[in-house]
Image (tube, rainbow, N blue to C red):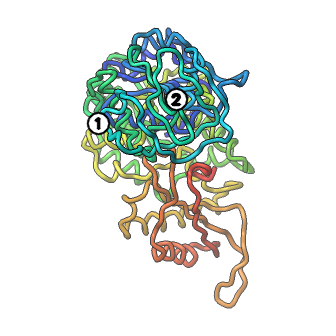
Amino acid sequence: MILYKGRRPSRAASAYIEGTLMAHSKVIIIDYGSQVTQLIARRVREAGVYSEIHACNVTAAEVAAMAPSAIILSGGPASVGEADAPTLDKGFLELGVPVLGICYGMQLLAQNLGGELAQSLTREYGPADLTLKASCALWDGLDSSKPSRVWMSHGDKVKTPPPGFVITGSTPTLEVAAMADESRKIYAVQFHPEVHHSVDGDAMLRNFLFKVCNIVPDWSMSSFVERVVKEMAEKIGDKHVVCALSGGIDSTVVAVLLHKAIGHRLHCIFVDNGLLRLNEGEEVVSYLREHFDLNLNFVQAQDRFLDLLKGVEDPEKKRKIIGHTFIDIFDEEAKKLPEVEYLAQGTLYPDVIESVSHKGPSAVIKSHHNVGGLPETMKLKLVEPLRELFKDEVRKVAAELGMPDSIVWRHPFPGPGLAIRVLGEITEERLNILRQADKIVQEELRESGWYRKVWQGFAVLLPLKTVGVMGDGRTYEHVIALRVVDSVDAMTADWARLPADLIARMSGRIINEVKGVNRVVYDVSSKPPSTIEWE
């Protein structure tokens, strides 16, 4: 369930201590705005080590309070020489932990430690062959007799390494492609080991974690569940929590975790905003009451939302109206409950990265109205146990909790619901057209066996009509777009190569069964540059 877009206080040490993930090794990733910074976090976590991304304006003192086992400096779009380019807090290098600089991070290290930078004659983007020139802990176990294929994306370059650094890798076009001062445990690479195009990238990162940092991998979903239940119980004490429950995997996992932590002092509220899929409200409530021992309040607020959305076409205005209305309803319902001090939400890391600019200089893509805190008028404190997890990690938590496959593998559904899949004005007529079309998409994906193979599949109602011929008559009716994507964590996605006969069945059924539609198109764009949702 998505609630509110706003700005959250800085992640200073005091705020961090209140978090849910403390008692384990952790790698702090300083984000300089790279669009693939999250891949660094994922690679580290996949190695069994907890990692967090923090904005490049975080201070060394704040990072020190987090007790990191290592620091990784990410890439970024800026040129180090620009006047307003993000800078390096040299205090990071005084914390006594290993440091790895990637791309822009390498250039920052060179700039601050006495190296010489230069601008490349041409921007280097794409594959390159890395020659391992000198012995280095990052190369442990790699075959130095042949080049390693890596992925480059940079404009500036290191011309001369700082004093104490050795050139450890080169490419045909880049003399200083990697460098290291092993006595200080400072390493730097110009390429991106975090992307899968860097063939040995995962091994290099693991070498940094285990050979350089001597970290013992202790990050797992079972340890997460145990830890978060304990810490939520301690944080909430004898108070009550209201949970924004949608029936999707994120909010359901939050509810089950909190129920384990505080029992029936958890109060779940499911709001039907009139923007759900066909019969979804009743089905969700029935399912949750059958499978989970939860305090569940079903609030039917369809008219309230739809009245506020009349005539609104701008997608950001839609999101904000829906977000603030959810907040109002939850505030009203919470006031009816005893000693409620907390609001629980299923916020995930991709929501945070896409919505909140304080995560670094990377662009804000869209507002997620569960990110950023609560309005001052609402007195509840936020509880977000999944805030630092990616979607696939949440699925692992759900499996760890013994949840059925129907929840574990349910496709993501946006908090604003069909409001962002009805492009243009929202009316009951247009919602009903989309509901029927989307039901057909879901049925065909399941019956064909493709539902579990793809990340997400749905229908979109476009704000236009086209000419068609049905029977012997001319029609002028609506257009449905089909959006089916493959992804791991929603940060990147590619359009799904569904069999042509499956797309044909979807199209044929929608045109024949949904009154008011005479054309179906298939979205073949990836993320980036597109987003998964259309709005």
Q: Which residue lies most toward the bottom here?
A: 472
* Residue at the spot of label 1: 141
Residue at the image position 59 percent from the left and 58 percent from the top: 525
Q: Amino acid at mark 2?
A: Ser
Residue at the image position 41 percent from the left and 44 percent from the top: 147
Q: Which is more toward the observer, 252 or 190? A: 190
Residue 326 seen in the current view: no
Residue 249: percent from the left, percent from the top? 39, 44
Is the residue marked by circle 1 packed among few (<14), some (14-19), or many (20+) residues within 10 Å? few
351 vs 80: above or below: below
Tell me the tag on residue 74.
Answer: 2
332 vs 16: above or below: below
What's the distance in space between the residues labelled 1 and 2, CA to CA? 24 Å
In front: label 1 or label 2: 1
341 vs 478: above or below: above
Asked which quadrant contains residue 519, the reply is bottom right
Secondary structure type for disc 2: loop
Tell me the tag on residue 81.
Answer: none
Indicate left or right for 403 with 531 as reference: left
480 vs 70: above or below: below
Q: Amino acid at mark 1?
A: Gly
Residue at the image position 49 percent from the left and 57 percent from the top: 485
Q: Which is more toward the observer, 366 or 234? A: 366
